[in-house]
Amino acid sequence: MPGFQDLYAFCLPYFHILLDWVYRVVFRTRLSPLTEESLWRKFTVEERRVILSEDLTRRWWYEGFCILLKCYREDETLSVAGRKVVETRWTEVLQNRLAISRRLVSVDISVCQIKKPIFIIGPARSGTTFLLNLLYEDPGNTSPRYYETMHPVEEVTVEGKERRLMTEQRALAAVYKEMPEMKAQHYIHADRAYECYHLMDQMGLFKNFRLLTGNFQEYEAWQITLTKDQMVEVYRFHKLQMQLILLGRSKDSFENNQQLVFKESTHAMNLEAILTVYPDALFINTYRDPCEATASNMSLCEACMISLGYEPKDIDLGLIGQDKLRCPLVNGGNEMVKFRKSHPEEEHRFCDIDYKDIVGSPMAVVRQIYKFFGLRLTSEGEAKMSAYVREHPQNKYGRHKYDLKRYKMTEEEVMEYLKEYVGFYKSRQ
């Protein structure tokens, strides 16, 4: 017989739907109206001044923040639960900028130097998550953790645990309980290494939320207008957040000279900006058959849209297919190739890794990376990474099945669009 908590969890979505209906009929609004005014009501006048101040960054970020908020507000296919998720994340972004501004008053970020960071820049679904987690096992390496990317500086503790960690553990547990198949597609651990895209949220650059709505055209048009100078500012803020994350840990995080490893597919389209901010940066490019990687990513995005509350009948599978193929946010291979061809002097920075090798011989890949970048592979690091390989075999949480045809896409179309990327990689084998 179900307990009270199970009954409560079952009834809550229906209560929200009913309450939203009352709001629409009686108050001519929504339970989560997703307006600037509805978000700002949660902040004092002084907090709003600090959040919008240009002491932290220039204010252009707020335009993108509001445009994508509008896209979701006008998306009639988004469920009540989905609107609550958007409201929560947009509120968190404002809270994060406020917390960052306040923290900077009391710390000296110059004591936290970031030297020769490694950026894993391969396309989505090309083994980058496994590789990041594998490298994270080496005590000599570190990365931003998922809960830290969601809340870069909050340090409130409850019974000895950080509130931000507990918040994300509960949120992820709820997702996997509702959709256990998501574990096979993209299993996130709240307190393990994670990719950078949530750090970009604070600059109005929402990668995952941009990919989880069909009503994205206005936001995409805004993103296209961003200049090199603006992207440099994005990465300066990326660096600042990472410094604050490290300072929020123990001193060991930055005084023991741990090798910092980032991972994010979006980085591939911003190499020039990255090198402006991190002039000694190094890059790992992972390569996978684009047809397999693209189909896998389409499937993941469809599942994430369902988790956000979209009804399957309202999801345009053809739009998912076209968008995920052509969106450099998830596959910046063509952009990476363009940079490397025009900057041959930077080739020493790039270590190219095949997805098949990550799956088939992960420790050989580790040795290849360490040798390429001149890193020291200790016996402890090798033992911990080898143990991780044994404990995390491919398909541990089930097999992720996907098919290009479901998204009205052909292999010929994918290979034609990414032919420059494919040709570049094959020429280097």
Image (cartoon, grey):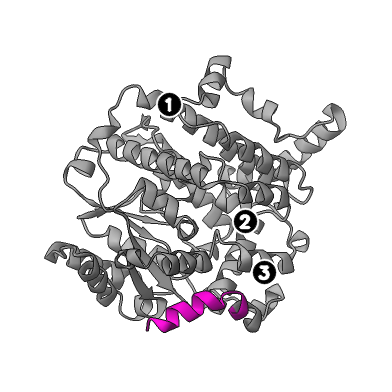
Work out how far the residue at label 2 is from the one at label 1, CA to CA, in angstroms. Answer: 29 Å
Q: Are marks 3 and 1 in contact (CB under 8 Å)?
A: no
Q: Residue drawn at (30%, 71%), measured in percent from left and top?
A: 389
- Of 360 and 2, which appears nearest the observer? 360
Residue shown at 31% from the left, 34% from the top: 160
Tell me the CA gap for discs 3 and 2. Answer: 11 Å
Residues in magenta? 415-429
Res. 101 mark = 1
Asked if the magenta segment contains residue 118, the reply would be no
- For the residues labelled 3 and 1, the Cα–Cα distance comes to 40 Å
Near mark 3 (Cα within 10 A), the count class, few <14, some 14-19 or many ≥20, is: many
- Residue in view at x 56 percent, y 67 percent: 297
Secondary element at image label 3: helix
Q: Amino acid at mark 2?
A: Leu
Apparent side of residue 328 relative to residue 111 in the rendered image (left or right) = right
Task: Name the spot of residue 54 as percent of width and height, x first.
Answer: 50, 26
Q: Which percent across, then down, holds residue 91?
A: 57, 33
Labels 3 and 2 touching (C-beta < 8 A): no
Residue 321: image tag: 3
Give, as a three-letter code, the residue at label 3. Answer: Gly
Q: Earlier in the sequence, mark 3 or mark 1?
A: 1
Q: Position of residue 90 (x, y in %)?
A: 59, 37
Q: Which residue is mark 2?
A: 211
